[in-house]
Amino acid sequence: MKKKKDGSDTVNINFKINEFEGPLDLLLHLIKENKMDIMNIEIEKITEQYISYLNEQEKMNLEIASEYLVMASELIELKSKLLLPNPKVEETEEEQVDPREELVNRLLEYQAYKEITKVLKEKEELRKEIYTKSPENIKNYIEEDTKLSSDITLDDLVEAFKKYLERKKESKPLKTKVTTNEISVSSRRLEIKSILKKKPKVSFFELFPVLNKEYIVATFLAILEMAKNRELKITQDKNFDDIICEVQDEK
């Protein structure tokens, strides 16, 4: 802390070169260091410290950006307006506008953008920790022996079943048996085999007499497993025709 000639205190602030992003950034720093109210800036003190910063740059032979010089001239002009005596205003005239108002508004706006920038920067750093992989065609990973038949694919079967479930939602609720027993894929395989012994050919949708999540999943997986193991043959004569499940002929 140094003393001025008039005996008042002045703050001695050390600046780092290239620390500020622009003149408004420097001004906000000075206001913070001097613990000033941004709505009531002491222009005289701020102007002196701002000019001192620019002089320090010149002493170190550093190039000063033109925007800093423009702000310096604005501060000097503002300081002059505040130091000059105000002419008497008649009672009928409007109240004079504070010369600092425009500068304060610019600082408040810049401060708001600076806070938003901090948040966006944090989100950017978090995003760097997330790695994404572009989508691939899963058909490249489907083994040849998973084909259901020569004329129907797994995608066809899934699409047909989706449409079947949509139709069931629109129709009246079916009577279903409520059971607490766990439904396994192996148990559904045995049940399907039993059905095919009595009736060699059945509609694909006949194998889903109960429409609840556990039963549907177990039945669908059982059908796929049986088709893969060549225990079951799935065919469809034409598009939109019924899908038929039958016992696979042993060769």
Image: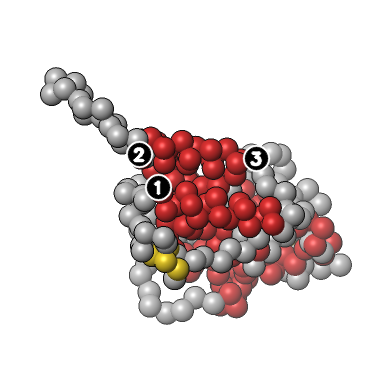
In the image, residue 84 above or below residue 126: above
- Give the CA distance from mark 2 to mark 3: 25 Å
Q: Residues within 10 Å of mark 1 (few under 14, many from 20)?
A: some
Tell which circle, 2 or 3, labels the residue nearer the N-terminal end. 3
Q: Nearer the viewer, residue 58 or 84?
A: 84
- Give the CA distance from mark 3 to mark 1: 21 Å
Would you identify the image quadrant in which residue 79 lies? top left
* Total number of numbered discs in the rendering: 3
Amino acid bearing label 2: Leu
Would you identify the image quadrant in which residue 234 lies? bottom right
Furthest toward the left, the residue is 91
Question: Residue at left 86%, top 67%?
Answer: 251
Name the side, left or right, on which 199 lies relative to 229.
left
Tell which circle, 3 or 1, labels the residue nearer the N-terminal end. 1
Name the side, left or right, on which 214 lies relative to 61.
left
Q: Quadrant of the N terminus?
A: bottom left
SS at mark 3 in the image: helix
Amino acid bearing label 1: Ile
**Label 1, on which residue?**
43
**Label 3, on which residue?**
66
Given contact means CB atoms under 8 Å apart, are the residues at marks 1 and 2 in contact?
A: yes
**Label 2, on which residue?**
82
